[in-house]
Image (cartoon, grey):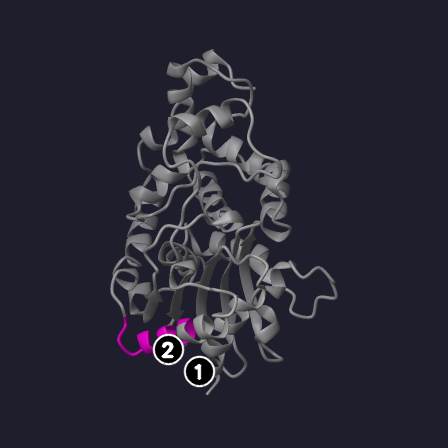
Amino acid sequence: MFSFSFSFSFSHPMTRPIPLARLAALVAFFSTVSALTAQTPALQPLVDRAAQTALEKYAPQKLLPTQLAITLVDLSTFPSPASPTDSAPRASYRGDVQIYPASVIKLFYLAAAHRWMEDGKLNATPELRRAMKDMIVDSSNDATHYVIDVLTGTNSGPEISDADIKTWFDHRNAVTHYFASLGYTGVFAHKKPWSDGPYGRESQAIRLFEPKRNMLTTDATARLFTAIATGQSVTAARSAEMMTLLARDLATKDPDPDNQAKFTGPILPTGAKLWSKAGWTSQTRHDAAYIELPHGPKFLLVVFTTDHANERTIIHTVAKVIADAFAK
């Protein structure tokens, strides 16, 4: 539980000196900026066609342009993990629009946890490793709560004074501040994912501070996933650890239609490989997926949809247009 003595003695992660190892990682992260701030003309028509195909197909269900966002990164010709990711072509449709990310935000908590561990601010205990695994593999909200607690030094609990909730909320924003320091825009990662809703100081913070929810853009999500997939998030070894958790079994027998492998996976051909982090609520359905097709083509696709959470095949439609184009 949060205590006053703890809150005032706690050293905010972002106020500590930046180790040399982190400075090197900052260079790698900033190398993605130009790739995710300028459209690639050759790729843009494909993204536009994928968006238009989905909008036309789901017009009877009243899918609107404002309810869809897409970012695509072509990694087919990416030479090696040592190459800067700004060499990877990309394009987007509403890629800079902030959208509630549901469980896709867990990708950002995962990367932050590895950064904290690399910098010696977190111990890689078996319990933390277990929580990180469950947060990504099973998309466990309870596991995510624990990860957020240890990342930010904050805990859920009873309401506290206005002065103390401000200090608490500043610490809770440690992950947001971290990604802002890397040049990310549109990223707000300061809320726990709830099943029934927040209580106590979690609810208090929602009443007092903006934004009231986590927020991501498909561009920011693609930027982070690109760094992970190409070995440039934190370190190559830690990127590989993250990719291990993100790997999906396309041959899964799980009947659950919301199994994470089924958000993009069903449209992929035999022999394809998938790494992903999905998110869904009663109002949203998203997927961030890195895909390797048979015979070489590789791409990273992020699709966010809102107000059509029960339309499971919108993401399929977008992904199929993209995958078919890459397979040619």
The quadrant of the rendering that contains the N terminus is: top right
Q: Residue at x 45, y 35 (%)?
A: 120
Q: Is residue 41 magenta?
A: yes
Read off the magenta span.
40-51
Q: Residue furthest bottom?
A: 328
Q: Main secondary structure of the magenta part?
A: helix
Q: Quadrant of residue 142?
A: top right
Amino acid type at circle 2 is: Leu
Q: Residue at x 48, y 43 (%)?
A: 109
Q: Nearer the viewer, residue 273 or 185?
A: 185
Q: Quadrant of residue 188?
A: top left
Residue 68 percent coordinates (x, y): 42, 62
CB contact under 8 Å: marks 2 and 1: yes
Label 2 secondary element:
helix
Residue 50 percent coordinates (x, y): 42, 74
Sequence-earlier tag: 2 or 1: 2
Residue 204 percent coordinates (x, y): 47, 24
Amino acid type at circle 1 is: Ala
- In the image, taking residue 79 as reference, residue 270 lies left or right, namely right
Look at the picture and state if 64 lies above or below 141: below
**Pointer 2: residues within 10 angstroms few (<14), some, or many (20+)?**
some
Q: Which residue is mark 1?
A: 325
Q: Is residue 74 magenta?
A: no
Q: Which residue is mark 2?
A: 46
Q: Does the image show residue 84?
A: no
- In the image, taking residue 69 as reference, residue 18 lies left or right, namely left
Look at the picture and state if 161 lies above or below 58: above
How far separated are the C-alphas under marks 2 and 1? 8 Å
